[in-house]
Amino acid sequence: MMKVPKLGHASLAAIGLTALALVAALTTRSPQAVADQAPPAAPPPPSVGVMSARMVKMAPKIALPGTVMSRNDSQLASEVEGRIAWVAEVGTVVKAGDVVARIDGKLASLQLQSDKANATRLSAQLRYDTSQAARMDNLFNQNAIAKSTRDQASSTKDMDTAALAQAQASLKRSEYQFAHSDIRAPFAGRVVARLINAGEYATPGKAVVRLVDTASLEVSVQSPIDAAHYVKEGSVLTVILQNKPVTGTIRAIVPVGDVASRTIEVRIALPAGAGLVGDAAKVFLPSAAPHDVLAVPRDALVLREENTYVFKVDKKDQAQRVAVETGAEEGPLVEVKGLVSAGERVIVRGAERLEAGQKVRAVKA
């Protein structure tokens, strides 16, 4: 059996002092040490922008393919014949009245000078024969000449009058041809093609350049006749160009249908610079009369592979995720079907990283 050594009074006193020091150290920790061991405070709830879902009148729509066109797209032709002296470069921007091509005007100038001289000669001849006819008429009244002589002088004057009129018409034609040796733009636009080159010979009616007004754009779309009953000129609708929504206005509805396809053409005016001539477009036209639907802003939609969702904020300021089906669109609003009611707050900003049931701080967007 092991013997326990006996401690003296001095040893027992030392042990007691050590214990008291340890207790004092444990009970006198600093507030900072206590705070360091406390659990961290929870972060504040994230701020999100919200808007209210509401009932609006909206019509279901069909998506139709269209093509961007220019309202002014012309192949400018020569009105006179002659050798082409100059043609504007492709890509040149011109204003209405600017020269886009020039025909060598030497022959036209020579013809103009010749017609001017001929008109001047006939004018002088007419003045002389008019005076001669007046003299013959005076002599006839005095019984000094025969009636045939008077009639011959009068006939000569009339022939000179007709000849001068013909010469003046030729002169006007020469002036017109000389003035139109310069082919001018009938509207502002851009030269997109040279259809003839310098040195080639142009004849009346031969196309010289293609000029396109790239600022006046519109979409041409073929609409089913049944759907056309729900559109009207002046209506504003959405057009998708280069994967971006653009607001367009229906400029014209051509009221003549195609017998084979049972469609009519609708022209939709676009803002300047909205697209390029020849761009493919997607047009959303109403296919039925408008009716009441529940709509939310497009920014409220959260798109996922498995479904489309919106986050709504309940009375406890918690974000609730709701699966919805989308329908018609009207400007920034989209029809939704799901567990969302009119007046409920839906998150339109900051919903991408939220979890269902997460606490949020709602701010009106």
Image (cartoon, rainbow, N blue to C red):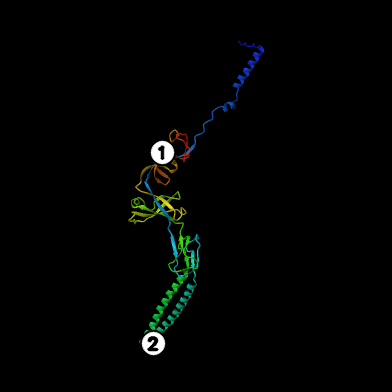
Please give the name of the residue rendered at 61% of the width and 21% of the height, measured from the top-left corner. 25
Q: Quadrant of the N terminus?
A: top right
Please give the name of the residue rendered at 42% of the width and 82% of the height, measured from the top-left corner. 129
Residue reaching furthest to the bottom: 144
Q: Position of residue 186 (x, y in %)?
A: 45, 63
Which element type, helix, strand or loop, lies under badge 2? helix
Please give the name of the residue rendered at 41% of the width and 76% of the height, measured from the top-left corner. 166
Query: The disc labelled 1 sits on which kind of residue?
Result: Ala
Query: The disc labelled 2 sits on which kind of residue?
Result: Leu
**Foreground pick, 231 / 357:** 357
Which element type, helix, strand or loop, lies under badge 1? strand
- The residue pinned by badge 1 equals 323
Residue 139 is tagged as 2
* Horizontal side, residue 98 vs residue 17: left or right: left
Please give the name of the residue rendered at 40% of the width and 45% of the height, measured from the top-left corner. 329
Whether residue 52 is situated above or below residue 285 in the rendered picture: above
Residue 315 is tagged as none
